[in-house]
Amino acid sequence: MLEIILFFFIVVAGTGGELCVSRAMKSIGEVHDFSPKSILNFILQSLRLPWMWLGIAMMSLGFFSLLAILSFQEVSFVVPVSALSYAAGAFGAKAFLGERISRNRWVGIAVVCLGVTIVWWSRK
Amino acid sequence: MSHTRRLQLKTVPMIVISIILGPLGNVFLGKAMKGVESFNSARVSDLVAIASEVLRSGYLWLGISCLLGFFIVHMLLLTWADYSYVQPATSLSYLSISVLSYFVLGERISPLRWIGVTVICLGVFLVGRTPPSTTGDTHRA
């Protein structure tokens, strides 16, 4: 049961956090200059955005859940199963970020989920 | 050069960096957590002792450093590419994490798990054939 709860936090909080960070990044806009000064400015600029902090908080919850589950499960099992976030991410990106997800992309995401299911069957 | 082609030229190298840094970070975290008492059998009163033990592990900080590097690369990617493109594309890391888990952590990976990981990578390939951005031109920083 603890395993299911931890996976829930990894998938839902982790994906929710990434969506918040993605929303913050889109408000900054495309980065063209990769010099250290520009990257530092980009990081400082992102830290001024509330969406960024909400994202960091949710991703932290997902991260601590990952640490907890790694204490009793294999890395090669936990990380692939956490790919369940692909389905959550696609729905979230469509609803929350207004991204248009083509049929081909949905097919790819469905195949990723099939792979996750197979990995789950290999659970020891 | 078309907008989509230009985006792909800088997106691919960044994805390669992220599929190395992310799994390396997770493998180091796994190594750190294997050295402590399992959360599955731990009592609430043990959590402080476990947390302080974990925080003293060099592997934890090495893992966090790799994941921080991964996070910055990921953030840069998200300034121009769709989340629903970046997330599946970086999932090629599932192949590298299986290889690293086998060689670094000595985990036995069953044929079924290899098949699952391969299917995930096939899904990634299908997603990678779609355009990186579907929400129109990105804005200049």
Image: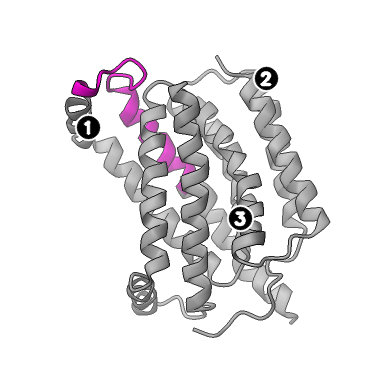
What x and y, as percent, mark residue A108? Answer: 76, 47
Secondary structure under the numbered disc 2 in the rendered image: helix
What x and y, as percent, mark residue A74? Answer: 47, 24
User: Residue at image x 82%, y 55%?
Assistant: A103
Residue A49, can we see it? yes
Q: For the residues tagged 3 and 1, is the chain the same? A: no
Q: Which mark is residue A92?
A: 3
Residue B28, can we see it? no
Amino acid type, mark 1: Ala
Amino acid type, mark 3: Gly
According to the picture, the residue beneath numbered tag 2 turns out to be B111
Secondary structure under the numbered disc 3 in the rendered image: helix
Eye-nearest disc, 2 or 3: 3
- Image position of B94 (left or right of B2): left
**Closer to the camera, A109 or B69?**
A109
Eye-nearest disc, 3 or 1: 3
Most common secondary structure along the magenta stretch:
helix
- In the picture shown, does residue B111 fall above or below A42? above
According to the picture, the residue beneath numbered tag 1 turns out to be B51
Mark 2 or mark 1: name the one nearer the start of the chain: 1
Spatial separation of the CA atoms under disc 2 and disc 1: 35 Å
